[in-house]
Amino acid sequence: MRRKVLILIIFALLFLAACSPAPDPAAAVTQYINALAAKDANRLSVLSCADFAPKSQELLDSITSVEVKVNSLACKTLENDGKNASVRCAGTLNATYNNENQTLDLSTVTYVMVNQKGDWLVCGQK
């Protein structure tokens, strides 16, 4: 009986660990870029700090009628002091509107991140 309870506790802990937010700022930026491409306003809001949320919405509004695809996305944390971090990504966002294609090189943007209550949030771009 004790063995079954112990096994259940271990599985519950593993499940909770899998559901918790990624402690890595680069993972949060990856989620942010994918949410932007998917035009997921709710997810963008969750992944943005309060000060940057209007800018995230503005970015989303600018691509509402554009088909956006993420290609070869790989983000890397450049600096991380536990409270603030900066992240840069490789890859591109490919946008198509009326058969016109544009490519945005993601390596030209550095994402400014803040850690709020254990969650890394996008709080700016350089």
Image (cartoon, rainbow, N blue to C red):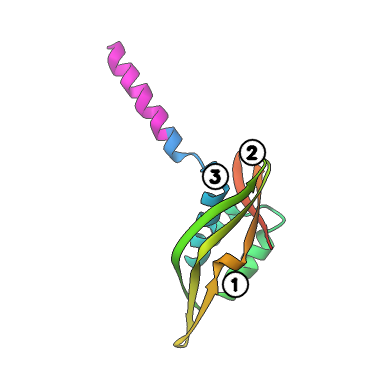
Q: Residue at left 64%, top 69%?
A: 58
Q: Which mark is residue 61?
A: 1
Q: Nearer the viewer, mark 1 or mark 2?
A: 2
Amino acid at dot 1:
Asp
How many other residues sit within 10 Å of disc 1, few (<14), some (14-19) or many (≥20)?
some
Q: Secondary structure at mark 1?
A: helix
User: What's the magenta region?
Assistant: 1-15
Tell me the quarter of the image containing the N terminus.
top left
In percent of width and height, residue 9 lies at 37, 22
**Vertical relation: 13 (above or below) 20:** above
Q: Is residue 56 left or right of residue 15?
A: right
In this figure, which residue is indicated by the disc labeled 2? 117
Q: Residue furthest front?
A: 78
Q: Is residue 39 visible?
A: no
Q: Residue at left 60%, top 46%?
A: 120
Between 57 and 87, the residue placed more toward the observer is: 87
Amino acid at dot 2:
Lys
In this figure, which residue is indicated by the disc labeled 3? 24
